[in-house]
């Protein structure tokens, strides 16, 4: 598999495009890069003896949101698999291309128990967990601020956004496949809750943790 050429292909397709009016150019490209790295980190720690499938995981992550944009989120996975097959034809073996496109086609089907219980789908499960995890933590905070600014809403309104994210964690956490992923998710939410508390205080002109400064 020609990884260097494929990386150039995905950058040409996504590097200067945005998925939403509030997002920056290349947001889907950089999301794909992060998901690729996350999936490999999870794989190395969950399956330390498994030396295969790194390229498949990487390329699937790069392309998984290629068709995710305003108005077609519900069908973006199917469209993305078709687009990836078209773009990658000749740069992967047929077997690898089938595996990549299968991951892309069903990567958002986190609710499908038949898929989640298939022990042969480690690549899919690793990708799903990495994709979910990338939407939480620092980038989740950044995206929330960008959305608020694009809608001309006061920064104080974002407090409710952060609270809703923190309150809705159980519905997301249950879709994670691995214990390590859940631990990472829990740590990200702990960080978000702490950030929210500090943001509430500083938004009111208070000094965070002032007692430890006196």
Image: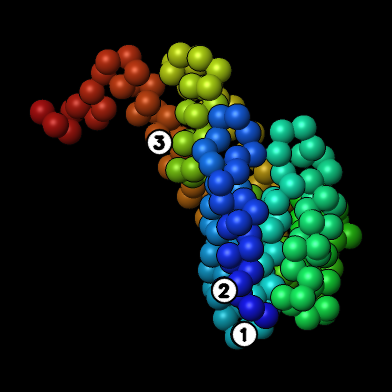
Q: Nearer the viewer, residue 43 or 105?
A: 105
Residue on which the image places disc 2: 4
Left or right of 89 on screen, residue 3:
left
Real-space CA distance between mark 3 and mark 2, rounded to the nearest whole angstrom: 40 Å
Figure check: 30 above or below 48: above
Residue on which the image places disc 3: 194
Q: Which mark sits nearer the N-terminus, 3 or 1?
A: 1
* Local secondary structure at mark 3: helix
Taking the spot 62% from the left edge, 51% from the top edge, the residue there is: 14
Give coordinates of residue 133: x percent, y percent: 58, 51
Figure check: 196 above or below 110: above
Real-space CA distance between mark 3 and mark 1, rounded to the nearest whole angstrom: 38 Å
Query: Dot 2: few (<14), some (14–19), or many (≥20) neighbours within 10 Å?
Result: few
Left or right of 197 on screen, residue 99:
right
Q: Which quadrant of the structure image shows residue 11? A: bottom right
Kindly identify which numbered label has been placed on residue 51. Answer: 1
Query: Dot 1: few (<14), some (14–19), or many (≥20) neighbours within 10 Å?
Result: few
Q: Residue furthest left?
A: 214
2 or 1: mark nearer the eye:
2
Taking the spot 48% from the left edge, 50% from the top edge, the residue there is: 187
Figure check: 117 above or below 134: below
Give coordinates of residue 68: x percent, y percent: 72, 44
Colour logic: rainbow
Taking the spot 69% from the left edge, 73% from the top edge, the residue there is: 56
Quadrant housing the C terminus: top left
């Amino acid at each position: 598999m020609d990884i260097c050429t494929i990386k150039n292909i995905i950058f040409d397709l996504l590097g200067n495009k945005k998925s939403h009016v509030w997002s920056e150019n290349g947001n889907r490209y950089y999301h794909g890069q992060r998901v690729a790295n996350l999936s490999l980190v999870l794989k190395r720690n969950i399956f330390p003896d498994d030396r295969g499938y790194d390229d498949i995981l990487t390329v699937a992550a790069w392309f998984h949101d290629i068709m995710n944009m305003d108005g077609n989120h519900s069908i973006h996975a199917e469209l993305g698999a078709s687009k990836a097959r078209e773009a990658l034809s000749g740069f992967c073996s047929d077997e690898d291309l089938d595996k990549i496109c299968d991951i892309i086609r069903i990567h958002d089907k986190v609710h499908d128990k038949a898929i989640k219980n298939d022990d042969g789908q480690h690549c899919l499960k690793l990708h799903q967990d990495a994709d979910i995890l990338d939407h939480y933590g620092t980038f989740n905070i950044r995206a929330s601020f960008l959305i608020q600014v694009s809608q001309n809403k006061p920064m104080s309104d974002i407090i409710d956004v952060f609270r809703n994210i923190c309150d809705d964690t159980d519905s997301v956490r249950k879709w994670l496949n691995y214990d390590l992923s859940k631990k990472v998710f829990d740590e990200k939410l702990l960080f978000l809750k702490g950030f929210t508390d500090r943001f509430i205080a500083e938004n009111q002109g208070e000094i965070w943790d002032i007692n430890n400064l006196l």
